[in-house]
Amino acid sequence: VVGGGGLGVSSRGWNANDNVLHWMEQSCPLEIVSKILACCGPKMALKLSKTSRFWSQVMKDETTWRTMCEDLYKWKEGDTVPHSWRDYYHYSPCVPIDHSTLAGALKVACALDATGTSLEQRHCVRVLLRPGKHFVKEAISIQSIGRTGISIETMELPQDTLTPPDVQQDVAPMDDKEPTRKALKKRAATLRKRLSCRSIRTMDDFDLDELVITESEEEPLAAPPRLVRASIVLKTRRHNEPIVRVRHGTIRLTNVALVHNSVGLDIWNGNSAIQIQPLRADERPSTILNRPAAFLDRVDVTSKSGRGIVNIDGGYTSIKNCYVHDCAATGIYVGGPGSDAVIDRTDVVRNGGGNRHRRGIARGHSGIYLEQGTARVRDCNISRNSLSGISAVSASNAILSLEASDLVANGTVQLEMPPTGSVSRRRSLARNNIVAVRGMPRSRSGLADEEEEEEEGREEQQQEEEARGV
């Protein structure tokens, strides 16, 4: 007999005539049952808990939830041990294992308000994304209450884990509509198919024929590529729609890529990958709300239609080890009284080139534009932006601290400090920086392809020399 906690099962092997669920109840070792449940998701586990006393006891056992957390890489040795493994699993949803879309995973944070009529973000949630593309049709809106925070990050998988080539098909575009009965029936699958389609494959799962070519071939095939980062891609018809909009509360983005493209020209109010802006006075509820804040670590940000990151009207953003590049407008924009940005070890390159739309964003924007507020920039690479590297414009309220950074090969000016003799100029600081019209800056984030960056830099430098020669 294998088992514990009063749930003893026989060690009899699998019989072809056995029903799968009957075999799991009667013969399958409990540690294997937990591993199988890890692949079926919480909705199926909840349904199973209502079918019999056996499954009800299995789902109440904390050991079951710990095994599920470990097998789905939600928790690993060295992490803080949670008080409740079941709650830890529930508030660490994995996409697409637990939820098929990012929108569904974020609903875990919601609960009814005091009136019982609307949902509010009242729970701290850590969303884990499997490497691959995740499509959204509308902005991820952060309006959390109290100290509630939302975290979105790429799953940390073992080195021998390979992402299946159909990962993009697993992650459906965001759609909050409930599926019809006909659609549910069409999508219905057997238990075996349901479990197999959401597994995370490792090297041992691949047939050798997939990885190695026969001796008759001249060269062996390379192993399937291992994706290391999840990408959140906006596909929408809405005008001036960001990927992430923070109105109050906190969001943390770790090791993800944001690919933004939206219709519209309003780069102050929505046409950006990330928009950090508190509610207006007439929009605020009676409850006390926290300052909107975004913490970015190892995030790749690009916008084909607008700005990369917009922090205005008193918001806060921390940008560390990030790569903000190829945005149609400004890479990082800070404006409005009380706005604060901290930028460390980040590459801000090739921004402000405009887009190809007939009535789109025109060329000529800065890498970092500080209209009002405070910006602390340290050990960054701000280069090859179309207008200026960094511009701090307000004479009374644009405080810039710039240290140990490279400002190279930007369009018209490398560094625009506040006007001489102004309050902002006296409170600003710039030291130990490399400021040059031409040259090869050093990449900081580790996310940029340094060889590609160097090649593009050489091409641009060559074009400039040819233009001067003409």
Image (cartoon, grey):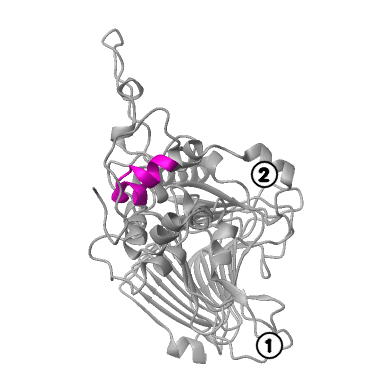
Residue at position x 62%, y 48% from top? 173
**How many numbered markers are drawn?**
2
Q: Which residues are magenta?
A: 22-35
Q: What is the C-alpha distance between the residues marked 1 and 2?
A: 39 Å
Q: Earlier in the sequence, mark 1 or mark 2?
A: 2
> Would residue 17 be seen by someone viewing this image from the given angle?
yes
Q: Locate residue 62, reporting x and y percent.
A: 34, 65
Q: Quadrant of the C terminus?
A: top right
Above or below, comparing residue 408 to residue 28 in the picture? below
**Residue under numbered circle 2:** 184
Q: Nearer the viewer, residue 197 or 44?
A: 44
State which quadrant residue 182 falls in: top right
State which quadrant residue 88 falls in: bottom left
- What element does badge 2 sit on? helix
- What element does badge 1 sit on? loop
Above or below, comparing residue 250 to residue 52 in the picture? below
> Would residue 384 be seen by someone viewing this image from the given angle?
no
**Residue under numbered circle 1:** 285
* Numbered disc in front, either 1 or 2: 2
Is residue 447 shown in magenta? no
> Which residue of the protein is positioned furthest toward the right in this rendering?
359
Q: Locate residue 404, reporting x and y percent.
A: 31, 70
Q: Locate residue 85, reporting x and y percent.
A: 36, 67
Main SS, magenta residues: helix
